[in-house]
């Protein structure tokens, strides 16, 4: 990882190499939202949970809109919650920004719905 481990925060948007896709997976180098809990990040894990980001509107109900600006994104984008995955921290090349607390909460709500987790 190019940056320091201490800059990783839950909700950070990082450039991550997701590798070669299989089927319709999100892949290649792209931004992704780090959704690992901050308490876990503080322990410097070697594996992180992320949600890939795209700028292509496809109309999936599991996509969460992300605003450009402090997120580090150049254009309005979507967090593709249906593509959430675990990745090695070594796949992160750079942290570019941070989603808002509302956007992070919405992403976590959709992730909970995807795995049928009861609401907090």
Image: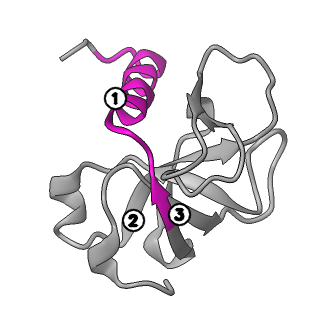
Of labels 2 and 3, the one closer to you: 3
Mark 2 Cα-neighbour bin, 10 Å: few <14, some 14–19, many ≥20: some
Q: CA distance from mark 1 to mark 2?
A: 21 Å
Q: Which residue is mark 2?
A: 47
First of labels 2, 3 by sequence position: 3
Mark 1 Cα-neighbour bin, 10 Å: few <14, some 14–19, many ≥20: some
Indicate whether residue 41 is drawn in magenta: no
Q: Which residue is mark 3?
A: 14
Quadrant assignment, res 38: bottom left
Q: Which residue is mark 1?
A: 105
Of labels 1 and 2, the one closer to you: 1
Residue 47 is left or right of residue 68, and the answer is left
- Relative image position of residue 31 (x, y in whole percent): 63, 57
The reply to whether dot 3 and dot 1 touch (C-beta < 8 Å) is: no
- Relative image position of residue 10 (x, y in whole percent): 32, 52
- Relative image position of residue 27 (x, y in whole percent): 75, 55
Q: Is residue 96 above or below residue 12?
A: below
Of the pair 60 and 12, the residue shown nearer to us: 12
Residue in the image at 25% along x and 48% along y: 37
Q: Which residues, given as a range, are shown in magenta?
A: 96-117
- Relative image position of residue 48 (x, y in whole percent): 40, 59
């Amino acid at each position: 990882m190019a940056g320091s481990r201490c800059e990783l925060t839950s909700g950070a948007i990082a450039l991550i190499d997701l590798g070669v896709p299989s089927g319709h997976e999100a892949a290649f180098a792209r931004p992704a939202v780090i959704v690992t809990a901050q308490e876990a990040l503080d322990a410097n894990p070697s594996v992180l949970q992320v949600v890939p980001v795209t700028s292509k509107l496809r109309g999936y109900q599991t996509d969460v809109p992300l605003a450009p600006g402090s997120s580090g994104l150049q254009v309005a984008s979507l967090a593709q919650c249906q593509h959430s995955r675990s990745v090695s921290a070594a796949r992160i090349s750079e942290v570019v920004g941070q989603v808002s607390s509302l956007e992070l909460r919405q992403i976590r709500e959709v992730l909970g719905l995807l795995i049928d987790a009861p609401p907090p």
